[in-house]
Image (tube, rainbow, N blue to C red):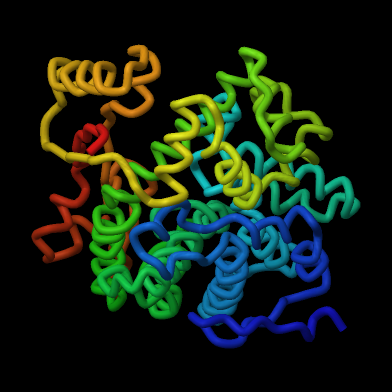
Amino acid sequence: MNKLKIFNDPIYGFITIPNSLIFDLIQHKYFQRLRRITQMGMSYLVYPGAHHTRFHHAIGCVHLMQKAVNILRYKGVTISKEEEEALYIAILLHDIGHGPFSHAMEHSIVNGVSHEQISLLFMERLNEEFNGSLTLAIKMFKGEYERSFMCQLISSQLDIDRADYLKRDSFYTGVAEGNVNSERLITMLTVVDDNLVVEEKGIYSVEKFIIARRFMYWQVYLHKTGLVAEQLLMRVLMRAKELTKLGVKLDASKALLYFLNTDISIEDFTEDTLNIFQELDDYDIVSAMKLWKNHDDYVLSNLCDMIINRELLKIKIKGKVIKGKQLDKHIDVLMAEKNITKQEAEYFVFTGSIHNQAYEAKRQNINILYKTGKIQDIVKASDHLNLEALSKPVTKYYICYPK
């Protein structure tokens, strides 16, 4: 019966669940948590429609993976039933380790533990629960399976993950420049010498895909308002952790308090920690900020107030590194004005950098297959002058300070 369940998705229409194991994984509390994790972090402060979740995205990825499997089989690529199921599991669970507001958590509450590492821990735990039926999927997720093209479908420069999130994020933000034709891209895929390649007639779809990715980074993912909001959120969590260590009592959910009170690195991620982590979502953070904005601590209350009421810091983005003199000037002004210490002022005045590289020519190239059988990297194959420029990394620098 489970196989008959369908989702109605605003992007692709009806999405069918391929089998009962996938259905049971979707039903699991670890996966259901993704309904409470926004896909785009703080971007809703810029684009009011950007409230879609990691749950949406993961289901969309399974739909696209089903299309990819059908297309490749149609083109004569052998994919066994076990491999097919493993591909669906790996793409379904690829983001299961994301913390609240997606990326803010990785840099402030857990010590440099990436969401990929936590995803793997969740998958290993589910593998025990589902009697080893995720073993092959885990191998593919780690990029260790001998059939490279399967690992490339899950993680590469033209993977199912990107094919869904670019289309989905562009839909929910209303930024039309990011809209890619995922279905056409997938239809153009084939396999040569165990590697994923794109047929020659799909070259323009790939160009559009790379350019759309660049637009989405500058216009959406690295938008200055979203950027400053995410920085403020990271600082809220850092300040909360700092105060907790000093013995200041903060009101928050049990799960959030655990991570504020405990230094967690990847070695400390026991099964108990994982179960507490799965209790943590966007709602814990928002409800904590609503309480903390009335706290006695100047830094914590002001940071929370800025996010809750969208009264953010001023941010300036420049092409060159920001001088320390400029930073010190803003810090001195704030210290004098609010009668706070330098350490407290540094929560409101800071610099950083952002990077955008739409295509990394040195990492798992996107290869074009010509009718003659020749294979060439997209940058060389394309007559689009911008593509070579898009493969060069661009770095910009920002400074944030109170208005």
Q: Residue at x 20, y 37 (%)?
A: 395
Q: Residue at x 40, y 74 (%)?
A: 171
Classify residue 37 by image quadrant. bottom right
Q: Position of residue 203 (x, y in %)?
A: 26, 71
Q: Position of residue 327 (x, y in %)?
A: 20, 21
The quadrant the C terminus occupies is top left
- Residue 119 visible in this rendered orientation of the protein: yes
Q: Residue at x 19, y 38 (%)?
A: 396
Q: Is residue 51 above or below residue 371?
A: above
Classify residue 22 by image quadrant. bottom right
- In the image, taking residue 272 as reference, residue 43 lies left or right, namely left
Q: Depth check: 396 or 23 in front? A: 396
Q: Depth check: 125 or 189 in front? A: 125
- In the image, taking residue 328 as reference, residue 338 lies left or right, namely right
Q: Residue at x 62, y 13 (%)?
A: 246
Q: Position of residue 351 (x, y in %)?
A: 26, 28
- Residue 375 visible in this rendered orientation of the protein: no
Q: Depth check: 311 or 58 in front? A: 311
Classify residue 382 by image quadrant. bottom left
Q: Is residue 107 above or below residue 223?
A: above
